[in-house]
């Protein structure tokens, strides 16, 4: 009886802390989005320092609100957290590009992401089953074709990311060419990040963690493309890659199909 009481108390405490993390994350994102619709001197100065066009700022605010709404709705909370991870990756990339202080600026979005994911992880047993450390799914897929397609998509996305990582170690700017959109002294760092995330993604026990980290990285790539003035559609190419790498996991693991993009509150 004592053990059962302690278990119930621990479960309630975990639930309360999870909801606290979630509410704090939502409030922060709402505050962050609201700033994007203002033209206060602080916002203008921050955007100018990051080199991000002010004309795109309201669109970023809309994206933040949509992602936060998905995160706040129980049936799409994991999808919302995933999209917010990409959003935070964009913020990290913009801070890193201008060499802002590491712990107070560049890594700050990671602190928020930990609250975002931590809130769900504490509340939802299914997420604890697959993230951050996962084992092979005990649920057998009803179709070998489904699993085979999943492995093909996983291999394609991993090869593509590894290819871009190799390019970062062999890149040499041509004489007289315009300066790169990202500082050269960070290019090798990006390559190491890509290799690390890909290794985590390919290893079954950390595949979901690797996919989440890769989502943040690809969100950063999208932000840098937009910041450099690339057309919208080419700038969104990293999002397509993220969709392919998640599709690979989703097709292979029935637990992920139970988690997102839509799941019922009753299944929690």
Image (cartoon, rainbow, N blue to C red):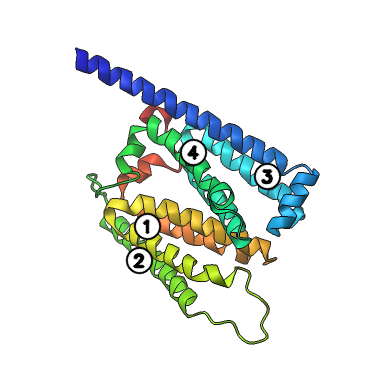
User: Mark 2 — residue?
Assistant: 155
Taking the image as shown, residue 231 lies to the left or right of residue 18, namely right
The Cα–Cα distance between marks 3 and 1, rounded to whole angstroms, is 30 Å
Front tag of 3 and 1: 3
Is disc 3 surrounded by few (<14), some (14 to 19) or many (20+) residues within 10 Å? many
Residue 250 in view: no
Front tag of 2 and 4: 4
Q: Identify the mark nearer the N-term, 3 or 4.
A: 3
Front tag of 4 and 1: 4
Taking the image as shown, residue 252 lies to the left or right of residue 178, namely left
Q: Tell me residue 229's x, y (percent).
A: 70, 65
Marker disc for residue 116: 4
Q: Identify the mark nearer the N-term, 4 or 1.
A: 4
Is disc 2 surrounded by few (<14), some (14 to 19) or many (20+) residues within 10 Å? some
In the structure shown, which secondary structural element does the residue marked by tag 2 occupy? helix
Marker disc for residue 248: 1
Taking the spot 46% from the left edge, 76% from the top edge, the residue there is 169
């Amino acid at each position: 009886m004592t053990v059962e009481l302690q278990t119930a108390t621990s479960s309630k405490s975990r639930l309360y802390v999870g909801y606290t993390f979630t509410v704090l994350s939502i409030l922060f994102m709402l505050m962050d989005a609201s700033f994007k619709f203002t033209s206060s001197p602080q916002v203008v100065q921050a955007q100018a320092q990051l080199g991000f066009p002010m004309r795109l700022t309201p669109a970023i605010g809309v994206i933040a609100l949509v992602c936060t709404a998905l995160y706040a709705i129980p049936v799409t909370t994991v999808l919302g957290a995933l999209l917010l991870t990409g959003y935070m990756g964009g913020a990290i990339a913009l801070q890193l590009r201008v060499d802002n202080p590491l712990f107070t600026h560049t890594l700050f979005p990671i602190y928020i992401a930990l609250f975002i994911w931590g809130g769900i992880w504490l509340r939802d047993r299914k997420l604890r089953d697959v993230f951050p450390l996962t084992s092979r799914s005990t649920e057998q897929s009803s179709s070998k074709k489904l699993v085979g397609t999943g492995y093909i998509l996983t291999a394609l996305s991993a090869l593509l990311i590894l290819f871009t990582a190799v390019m970062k170690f062999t890149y040499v700017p041509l004489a007289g060419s315009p300066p790169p959109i990202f500082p050269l002294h960070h290019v090798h760092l990006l390559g190491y990040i890509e290799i690390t995330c890909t290794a985590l993604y390919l290893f079954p026990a950390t595949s979901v963690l690797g996919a989440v980290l890769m989502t943040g990285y690809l969100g950063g790539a999208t932000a840098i493309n937009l910041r450099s003035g690339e057309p919208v559609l080419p700038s969104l190419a990293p999002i397509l890659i993220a969709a392919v790498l998640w599709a690979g996991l989703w097709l292979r693991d029935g637990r992920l199909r139970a988690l997102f993009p839509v799941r019922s509150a009753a299944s929690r």
